Amino acid sequence: MQFDRPGVKYVWLLVMLLFVFSIVTMLNTSVLAGYIMVLPIPFLIGYILDIRGFEIDFKNDKIRKYNSFLGIRSGEWMPLSAFDSVRVYQDILETQRGKFIRIGPKSYDTHEYYYVRIVSPGLSKSISLLELDNYGRAKFQAEKIAKHARLIFIEQPAKLKGDKV
């Protein structure tokens, strides 16, 4: 679930307000008006949740990155033959410790993340499959995906340079 979409905080607030106002409307004035106010809530919650993922169809040798809205998946299928390897990429995130209180010599913490990606020849396309905080787990998952997809596994983690596809 992706809660980092633009405006999700405001949409979530709108959902709560609609829910409260619909209950108040049902109790005080009209049950029908309250039900009408509840109708957009599932669509707003679908916007908030915005489930993303990937599917690999080994039978037909296809892969796709999808977005799911209210259970309906959409995304373009690509041939698995367009990709030749599975790689682990490393990214570093620095977070500020505090704006007003400085603890220790550094004012930030460093966190390493590892992305398992399926990559095309020449690195022109890639699809991010997993995000993990441990290299050992990322390597294990990448090896497993490479074995099932019959692709090459590149062991050395590379620095992340930008998102493709």
Image (cartoon, rainbow, N blue to C red):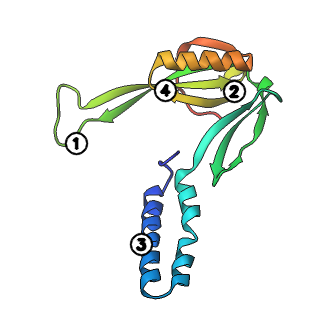
Q: Residue at x 53, y 45 (%)?
A: 1
Amino acid at circle 1: Lys
Which residue, given by chain and number where applicable, does mark 4 sit on? Answer: 132
Q: CA distance from mark 3 to mark 2?
A: 49 Å
Q: Secondary structure at mark 2?
A: loop
Q: Residue at x 73, y 20 (%)?
A: 149
Check disc 4 and report its element: helix, strand or loop.
Answer: strand
Q: Earlier in the sequence, mark 3 or mark 2?
A: 3
Q: Classify mark 1: helix, strand or loop.
A: loop
- Structural distance between the alpha carbons of marks 3 and 1: 36 Å
Q: Which mark is residue 124?
A: 2
Instruction: State the CA–CA distance, disc 4 to disc 3.
Output: 38 Å
Asked if marks 4 and 1 touch (Cβ < 8 Å), the reply is no
Answer whether labels 2 and 4 touch (C-beta < 8 Å). no
- Looking at marks 4 and 3 on the same chain, the residue that comes earlier in the sequence is marked by 3
* Count of marks placed on residues: 4
Left/right placement of residue 49 relative to residue 106 reads: right
* Foreground label between 4 and 3: 3
**Residue 90 coordinates in the image, percent (x, y):** 49, 22
Q: Looking at this view, is 55 or 65 the one in front?
A: 55
Which amino acid lies under the numbered mark 4 shown in the image of this protein? Leu
Which mark sits nearer the N-terminus, 4 or 1?
Answer: 1
Q: Is residue 18 above or below residue 138?
A: below
The crowding category of the residue bearing disc 1, from other C-alpha atoms within 10 Å (few below 14, some 14 to 19, many at least 20), is: few
Image spot of residue 61 (x, y percent)? 80, 27
**Mark 1 sits on what residue?**
99
Q: Earlier in the sequence, mark 1 or mark 2?
A: 1
Query: Which badge, 2 or 4, is on the more N-terminal residue?
Result: 2
> Looking at the image, is mark 3 or mark 2 nearer the viewer?
3
What residue does disc 3 label?
20
Q: Dot 4 surroundings within 10 Å: few (below 14), some, or many (20 or more)?
A: some
